[in-house]
Amino acid sequence: MANWAWFHKWGSPRWFYQFSGRLLPWLAVPGLLLFIGGCVWGLLFVPPDFKQGNSFRIIYVHVPAAAVAMGAYMFMATAAAVHLIWRMKLAAMVMKVVAPIGASLTFLSLVTGAVWGKPTWGTWWVWDARITSVLILFFLYLGIIALHQAFENREAAAKACAVLAIVGAVNIPIIYWSVEWWYSLHQPASIKFIGESTIHPTMLRPLMATLSGMYLLFGWLVLLYTRAEIIDRERNTRWLQDMLLTDRPADSAERGA
Amino acid sequence: MKRMGVSAVFVAILRRDLRSALRSGSEWANPLLFFAIVCTLFPLGIGPDARQLALLAPGILWVVALLASMMATDSLFRSDYDDGTLEQMLLSPMPMYPLVLAKILAHWLTSGLPLCLMSPLLAVILQMPMSGVPVLVVSLLIGSAILSFIGAIGAALTVGLRKGGLLLSLIVLPLYIPVLIFGSAAVKSAIDGVVYLPTLALLGALFMLAVALAPLAVAGALRISVDQ
Amino acid sequence: MYFESVEALLYMDGHGSYVWFCFALTFAVLVGLIVQARRRNRTARQLLASAARRRRAEQRSPQ
């Protein structure tokens, strides 16, 4: 059983709160540096694309948003499974906070994709397989958020959303594959997306920076929201009151005023 | 009370649900009426041009059948939840899988099957070429069963909520997409005279997957809704 | 530096408005998410402080 000690530790909000507090700067600082650095690099120093001109620079925010939004759903579904199988309270909190973050990133990737499409394809919206898939992902996120808000009982909300997240995760490969199939059926490859693999290395390096930066920022945001969630749920516990109120006397005095 | 076997309970639930659906009438008639009315709205919205309607008919019929099936799903567990039958089922030592399967099968027989049987009539109204009609019926037969399975998950999740109806559609519609894609594509292929059997086979594969997995998710979701 | 002047950087051969809009929106969304997290943290802390005050008052009152 000794192997499972880490697991029980992770399940404890108290341990997580203390541990995540130490982890925060290690995610925030490199994340911000990589993301902002990658953006500046991509905007100012990379030569424009041969075919698309300068509009290709949108890739440096579009692709990270889309990739992290996709990964976030799988992360959320994993947390959902952990919550259902081992009844880990912390996993329920993580699942709840990931949904709005993932939905924001999905929205961001849709809008940046549309704005990128205008100068590249001459139209804001194309029913391309990838765009359609991201749109469906957006709806899946919104469904989970709506379901969570509909429940008054927090525990039931978490469990219901966990079931829905897992059902969604099982369905995502099927949905993506069917959309891919649908697109190949209706559209002879007239519009070719610029695949990431064909990108020149000088253009790829800033993308790697913004992509890894976005992952780190996502982790940072998840920690921030989860910590707020822990304070909200555990506010009647002694350990949290002692930790937050005696550590900073100025803080409690200010709140008392 | 004497102990009943799983198959006896399965048949008992099936018979009870079918009888109550036939008695109330609205349960099986309303989705049909919805299907017919919405299909009538389309020519009024896009114009009576026969060629245009024929082009759009497979998609229209499939989308409207999908919506009608979803509307019917909302009431799937409602009465059992209200009168406590659901709680009894969950407390019984029976495995949930066959019970859920019986509920879904009864629901499909009273909502999905009538939709399939009425679809040729609406296909004629929408000027769909006759070559597509058999495939339309077959694709709706398989597809509406899958829709019943997926819809049951949404119905189970929202049965305890006061305003479940619209929420159910938000949850369930994205999951319906593969069925819509393959179903309407099979009908279009049949009309265009290209092979449609592989597409129907894909629908069949989705059906098998739904039969295997969806009742498990439904059972879990029902337990959450009842415990709440 | 690829661009020769600030104007060229802003204009980007006609694509400037698209590119800058996307980057601005991205930063707006990220900043919005961070601000929202801080705000939730603050309201949760306030609730915690009042819960602690209530508990202390309850502990004092019976004696």
Image (tube, coloured by chain):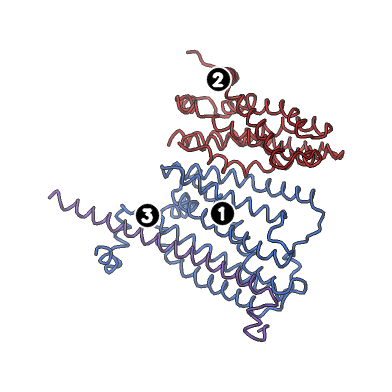
Chain colours: A blue, B red, C purple
Q: Residue at x 45, y 55 (%)?
A: A10
Q: Which residue position holds label 1?
A: A75
As measured in the structure, the alpha-carbon distance from the residue carrying label 1 to the one carrying label 2 is 45 Å
Q: Residues within 10 Å of mark 3 (few under 14, many from 20)?
A: some
Describe the element under mark 2 as helix, strand or loop: helix
The earlier-in-sequence mark between 3 and 1 is 1
Q: Which residue position holds label 3?
A: A232
User: From the viewer's perspective, is the residue at label 3 or at label 1 nearer?
Assistant: 3
Identify residue type, mark 2.
Ser
Residue C21 x/y as whole percent: 60, 69
User: From the viewer's perspective, is the residue at label 1 or at label 2 nearer?
Assistant: 2
Residue A38 x/y as whole percent: 61, 74
| In the displayed structure image, the side of residue A42 where residue A227 appears, left or right | left
Q: Residue at x 79, y 32 (%)?
A: B135
In the image, farthest residue toward the bottom: C4
B153 w.r.t. B1: above or below: below
As measured in the structure, the alpha-carbon distance from the residue carrying label 3 to the one carrying label 1 is 23 Å
A125 w.r.t. A45: above or below: above
Residue A180 x/y as whole percent: 74, 50
Describe the element under mark 1 as helix, strand or loop: helix
Q: Residues within 10 Å of mark 1 (few under 14, many from 20)?
A: some
Q: Which residue position holds label 2?
A: B24
Quadrant in the rendering for residue C25: bottom right
Identify residue type, mark 3.
Asp
Of all chains, the one bearing label 2 is B
Identify residue type, mark 1.
Phe
